[in-house]
Image (tube, rainbow, N blue to C red):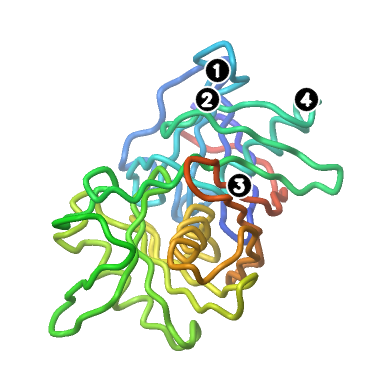
């Protein structure tokens, strides 16, 4: 069985969109997702966004998120921007609408310049809800990896994140430490791992090792996690530009229970058919 797909990127993060609003088929198996995610045997992607019909009155569509290793995750900031842009173009929608994600409702705003802003929910710092093993909630924690100790921030943006501050992102040990922290016993649901350099109060640089993927050109929820944890430390302003290997996004948060907003590009790469 062949079905159509649309391949896009958000800040270099490769996103495969499958529109199942009408057919509402179940997603592929883990083995098939791995095959499709590999560019040698399929269209290739970092994340697949499986778009389904609206599940409630307030949303226009729903979606699920799958990594290239076949694992299902709760959220993908770059992916949902691509979903919003795709739906806006395909259905000639109003500039603002709501999508239903596994992590809850997401408000989307599509601008005339093609940029898209999406609400990424409220950050969660409670260790039990991230989840992260800790005796009490704190702004920073000491995480032991091998025989080294690292000061880290832990936060959930609908998915668990660990953020380290580094002096030089180019020299950061992303592959080594990212994999070790992803599977650290203190992150029972695994973790996305961000390596953040703070340039000033309005600008940071970031590289991210994503759960089930490895390092990617960009990670939207990782950008949000890096900013909100830096704001919690009193190091960053309410609006911050995040420079990632694939480009830049802007993260805005006013603190407390307010929503985190992520703004960036969502661009078409190609369309095609794939065999399920």
Name the residue: 39% across, 60% down: 210
The residue wearing badge 1 is 53
Mark 2 and mark 1: Cα distance apart in space? 6 Å
Image coords of residue 227 (percent x, y) = 52, 62
Q: CA distance from mark 4 to mark 1?
A: 15 Å
Residue under pointer 3: 261
Which mark sits nearer the N-terminus, 2 or 1? 1
Tag 2 residue: 62
Q: CA distance from mark 1 to mark 3?
A: 24 Å
Residue 98, label in figure: none
Residue linked to disc 4: 93
Do residues under tags 4 and 1 come within 8 Å of each other at their CB atoms? no
Q: Quadrant of the C terminus?
A: top left
Left or right: where 137 falls relative to 260 = left
Q: CA distance from mark 3 to mark 4?
A: 20 Å
Q: Residue at x 19, y 55 (%)?
A: 136
Q: Residues within 10 Å of mark 2 (few under 14, many from 20)?
A: many
Q: Position of residue 204 (x, y in %)?
A: 58, 73
Location of residue 82 (image quadrant): top right
Q: Alpha-carbon neighbours of circle 1 within 10 Å: few (<14), some, or many (≥20)?
A: some
The answer to which quarter of the image holds residue 110 is top right
213 to 196, vertically: above or below: above
Label 1 or label 3, whichever lies nearer to me, is: 3
Q: Is residue 134 or residue 172 the one in the foreground?
A: 134
């Amino acid at each position: 069985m062949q079905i159509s797909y649309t391949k896009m990127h958000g800040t270099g993060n490769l996103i495969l969109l499958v529109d199942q609003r009408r057919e509402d088929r179940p997603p592929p198996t883990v083995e098939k997702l791995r095959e499709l995610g590999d560019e040698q045997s399929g269209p290739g992607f970092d994340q697949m966004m499986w778009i389904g019909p609206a599940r409630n009155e307030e949303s226009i569509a729903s979606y699920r998120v799958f990594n290239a290793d076949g694992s299902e995750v709760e959220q993908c900031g770059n992916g949902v921007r691509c979903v919003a842009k795709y739906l806006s173009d395909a259905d000639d929608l109003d500039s603002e609408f709501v999508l239903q994600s596994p992590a809850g409702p997401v408000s989307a705003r599509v601008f005339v310049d093609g940029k898209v802003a999406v609400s990424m929910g409220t950050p969660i710092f409670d260790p039990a809800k991230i989840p992260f093993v800790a005796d009490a909630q704190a702004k920073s924690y000491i995480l032991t990896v091998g025989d080294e100790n690292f000061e880290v921030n832990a936060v959930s943006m609908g998915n668990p994140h660990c953020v380290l501050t580094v002096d030089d992102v180019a020299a950061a040990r992303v592959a080594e430490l990212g994999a070790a922290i992803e599977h650290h016993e203190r992150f029972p649901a695994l973790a996305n791992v961000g390596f953040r350099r703070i340039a000033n109060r309005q600008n940071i640089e970031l590289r991210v090792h994503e759960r089930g993927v490895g390092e990617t050109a960009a990670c939207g929820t990782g950008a949000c996690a890096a900013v909100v944890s830096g704001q919690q430390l009193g190091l960053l302003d309410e609006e911050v530009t995040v420079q990632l290997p694939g480009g830049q996004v802007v993260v805005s948060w006013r603190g407390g229970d307010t929503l985190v907003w992520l703004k960036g590009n969502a661009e078409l790469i190609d369309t095609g058919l794939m065999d399920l």
